[in-house]
Amino acid sequence: MAAGYQTGARSPAPDVVDRRAWHVVAACYLGWMLDAFDFFIMAFVLDSVARSFGVPISATAFAITLTLACRFLGALLFGRLADRYGRRPTMMVNVLCYAVLELLSGFAPSFTIFLILRGLYGIAMGGEWGVGASLVMESIPGRWRGLVSGLLQTGYPTGYLLASVLFLAEPLIGWRGMFIVGAFPALLVLYIRRSVPESPDWLSRGEAVHHESLFGVLRRNIGLSIFAICLMMGFNFLSHGSQDLYPKLFLGRQQHLSHNEISLVMIIFNLGAIVGGLSTGLLSQRIGRRWAIGILAMLALPVIPLWIFSHGLVWLALGGFLIQVCVQGAWGVVPAYLNEISPAAIRATFPGAVYQLGNLLASPNANIQVWLAQRLGTGIGPAMACVVGLAALVITLLVAVGREARDVRMGHDRLDDERERSLSSGTASIRS
C-alpha cells in the first residue's frame, strides 16, 4: 500500500491531511508546468529545426500537430494504469517518460527520427494532465477545488513562461540545447516518491471497481462523454489557436519583433494567463464552474482586436496579456469541472481522455491557421482571430447546456465524512 492514506485505518488529523494534500498540489502543479515547458520549447524553435533538417516550416509545424494528436493515446494508456494501479506510481512513470523523450529529441539525427520522438513525447504528455488532475481533486478538500483548479492549470502558462525565458538563451545553446534542458523534469520523480501520498479516493474503492471496464462506463455515460469531448475540442482550439503560432509566425514574421522583444511579449503574455487561471478558478468556487467558464470565454471576443490588430510593443504586450487572462481564465476551471462530472470509477481516465480526444480533434489547428492565412492573404493574425473567436462562442454555448457538479464528494471529503460519523457515533455512545 502506498504511503499516506490507509484504507481501514483511523482517519489522519486534519492538519496532517492538509499537509499531505499540499504536497500533492505542488507535485501535480510542477508536473503539468514542466510538461508544458517541454511542449512549448517546440513553438520557439520551429524555424531553427526547419533550417537544421532542411525542411519547410510547415513540416516542423506538423511536429506540433503530431504531438497534440498522440496525446489521446497517452491519456488512455496512463489513465487506465492510474485507475488500476494507482495515481502516484503512474505519475512517476509518466514524468520520467516525457523527460527522457524530450532529452532524446535534442539528439535526433534526422527529421524522421525527430517526428517519431515528438509523437512518443505526445503520448507521455497526454497522460500527465488526467492522472495529475484526478490525484489532486481526490486529495484536497472540496472548498479548495476552485482555487487549486486554477493553480493547477496555471502550470501550463507557467511552463510556457519558462520556455519563453529559456528562448533568450537559444542563440547560445541552440535548439538542441533547449530540448536537453527540457529533461530536468525527471528530478520531479524523486519528490513524488518521497512526499506524495496515493489518492484516498482510489484507496477507498474495491478491487472490482479498479478493474471496471472503461468502455462499459463510457457506454453508460455516452451523452456526458460526447458533451465533454466537444467542450474540450473547443477549449483546445481556444488555447492552441492563441498560443502555438503566436511567437514565431505572428510576433516574429508578421509584426517583425526582434528576438528579445518576442521573449518580453511572451513573458507578459504568460503572466496574463497565470492571473486569469488563478482568479477565475477562485471565482468559480463562488458562482459555479459553468458561469465562470462562459463569462471568461465571452470576454475574449472584445479583446481579439487589441490582441491581433494593434501595433507597437506596448499594445501587442497588452493585447497578449488580456487575451490570455480570458483564455487561461476559462481553462482554469477545467481541472475541477471535468473531475466533478466524471464517473468516479474512471476518474483518472475520463478527464484526461476527453481532454486529449478533444485535443486530437483540434490538433490540426496549426495547419488550419497556416492554410487560412494563405487563403486570406493577410498574414497569420486574422486567421488566429477567426479560430479563437469561433472557439470562444462554441465553448460558451456548450457550457450553457452542461451541468454543474461543484458539490460532488471526492476522496478528501470522504475522510471528513468518516471523521464526522465517527465523532457522531462516539457522542451517541457516551449519551447512551
Image (spheres, rainbow, N blue to C red):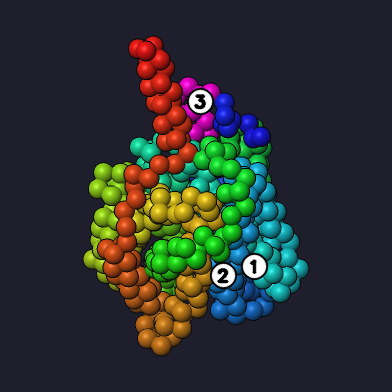
Name the quadrant containing residue 328.
bottom left
Q: Residue 274: percent from the left, percent from the top? A: 39, 49
Name the quadrant containing residue 394.
bottom left
Residue 345 is at least partly visible in this image = yes
Q: Is residue 18 magenta?
A: yes
Relative side of 291 to 202, left or right = left
Q: Main secondary structure of the magenta part?
A: helix
Residue 69: numbered disc: 2
What's the distance in space between the residues labelled 2 and 1, CA to CA? 8 Å
Earlier along the polypeptide chain: callout 3 or callout 1?
3
Name the quadrant containing residue 116.
bottom right
Q: Residue 239: percent from the left, percent from the top? A: 42, 63
Instruction: Classify mark 1: residues with Cα within 10 Å, few (<14), some (14-19) or many (20+).
Output: many
Residue that protrudes farthest toward the right in the picture: 109
Residue at the image position 44 percent from the left and 35 percent from the top: 414
Residue bounds of the magenta highlight? 10-23
In this rendered view, identify the residue nearer to me: 80 or 164: 80
Residue at the image position 63 percent from the left and 31 percent from the top: 3
Residue that protrudes farthest toward the front in the picture: 432
Asked if the residue at tag 1 contacts the one at tag 2, i.e. Cβ–Cβ closer than 8 Å, the answer is yes
Q: Nearer the viewer, mark 3 or mark 2?
A: 3
From the image, tell me which residue sits under label 1. Answer: 119
Tell me the quarter of the image containing the N terminus.
top right
Q: Secondary structure at mark 1?
A: helix
Q: Is residue 132 magenta?
A: no
Asked if the residue at tag 1 contacts the one at tag 3, i.e. Cβ–Cβ closer than 8 Å, the answer is no
Q: Secondary structure at mark 2?
A: helix
Residue at the image position 35 percent from the left and 12 percent from the top: 431
Q: Residue 427: percent from the left, percent from the top? A: 37, 16
Q: Secondary structure at mark 3?
A: loop
From the image, tell me which residue sits under label 3. Answer: 11
Question: What amino acid does circle 1 point to?
Answer: Gly
